[in-house]
Amino acid sequence: MDRFNEMTAFHAVATLKSFTKAAETLGTSRPAMSRHIAALESRLGTRLLQRSTRHVALTEEGRAFFTRCVEALEIIEDAEQNLLGNAGSAVGVLRVSIPSSFGLHYLMNAWPELLTKAPRLSLDIDLSDRPVDLIGDGFDVALRIGEAHSADLVRRRVSTMKMVLCASPEFIRRHGMPVHPNELKKFVVAAVARDQESYSWEFLVDGSPRNFEIRPRVKASSGHISRSIALGHQALVLEPHFLVAEDLKDGRLIEVMSEFPSPERNVYAVYPSRKHISSKVRFFVDFMKDTLAGSSLPSPR
C-alpha cells in the first residue's frame, strides 16, 4: 500500500479536476493516476470522485477527505522543509507580494531580522491590495488572507487572523443593531471586495459556518477604506481585528453580534511550484511562520 502516492494523486486530481492534468503535473501517466485513485477508494470503501467524460467532481466523502488530505500533505512538506531549510542557502533576489495593511501592521520590524538571518538574500517587496498573478507578475511568493486554494499554486498556512464585525456608536444610534446575521442585508455595509456578482459574509451559527448575503454600499480594495467609512458613521464593516483594535479599545467602534463570530481567516504563503521550491522561498515561508507565531496574531494550529 502506497498511501502517500495515493493521497498525492487524489489531491492533484481533486485540485485540477482532471486526471490528465494531474498526471502531467506529477510526471506520470493517466492510467497510473486512475490506479492510485481506484486503490485509495477500494481501501477506504467509498467513492471519492464522481467521473464523467468531461468532468471530475468530489463526492461528499471526497470533500471531507480532501480537507484532511491537504492537512496531511502540508505536514509532510513542513517536515521536509524543516529538515532542508537553511538560511545560508537563501541566495538571490526574492520578490514578495503582501497585502498592504497586513504588511504595515505586522512585518515592518521583521525585514531587518530576515536580512540578518539570510545575508546573501536581497528583497523586492510589493505592499499592495491588488490581485497579483504570481507567475505573470514575476513574484516568487506572496502572503494571502483567507483565499480559496488555486490549482496552480502551493499554499502553506503561516497563521490565522481574527475578524470582527463593528460599527460606530453613532451609526448604531441612527440605524439600530442587527441581532442575527440574516438581518445584514437590511443594513448599510462597506466591504473589502473585488468584482463579483454577489457578496456574502461568513459567521458561525450554532457552531457551524454559514454565509449571509450583504449588499455593500461601498466596495473597496483595502480595509483601511472600509474602516474610514465605519469611523465616519456610514456603515457596518467586517475587519481584521488588528486593523480596528485601537478603535474598539477607545470606543470609536463597537463590536456587533459577538455571539455570531466570523471564523478566523487563514493566512497563507503561496508560491507557484510544489515540485521545485527554491531555498529562498523555503526560508521565507518558515521565517514568516515563526515571525507571525510570535506576534499578536493567533499562532497557527
Image (tube, rainbow, N blue to C red):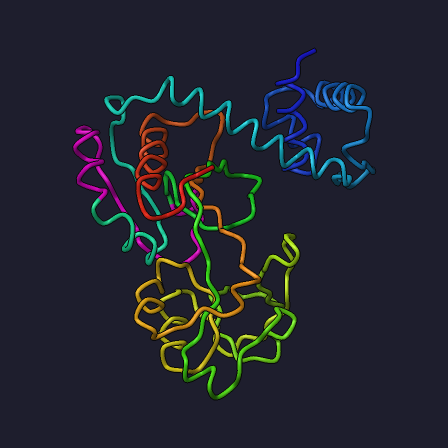
Q: Quadrant of residue 110?
A: top left
Q: Quadrant of residue 186?
A: bottom right
Task: Please state the horizontal and vertical placement of residue 188, each as a whole percent of the image.
Answer: 53, 80
Task: Please state the horizontal and vertical placement of residue 163, each as a whole percent of the image.
Answer: 46, 58
Q: Please, is residue 29 above or below residue 286 in the view?
A: above
Who is closer to the viewer here, 143 or 139? 143
48 to the left or right of 69? right
28 to the left or right of 111? right
Identify the residue shown where x is 54% and y is 39%.
152
Who is closer to the viewer here, 161 or 87? 161
Q: Please, is residue 115 above or below residue 128 in the view?
A: above
Identify the residue shown where x is 33% and y is 58%.
101
**Which residue extends farthest bottom?**
174
Identify the residue shown where x is 44% and y is 54%.
162
Q: Quadrant of residue 118?
A: top left
The mark tally for this picture is: 0
20 to the left or right of 27? right
Task: Please state the horizontal and vertical placement of residue 208, each as a whole percent of the image.
Answer: 65, 52
**Magenta-tinted stretch:** 110-137
Identify the residue shown where x is 67% and y is 35%.
14
Who is closer to the viewer here, 187 or 221? 187
Q: Please, is residue 276 above or below residue 103 in the view?
A: above
| Residue 119 within the segment the image draws in magenta | yes
Task: Please state the horizontal and vertical placement of residue 123, each as a whole percent of the image.
Answer: 24, 40
| Residue 44 within the segment the image draws in magenta | no
**Which residue extends farthest top?**
1
Which corner quadrant holds the N terminus?
top right
Q: Please, is residue 186 above or below residue 269 in the view?
A: below
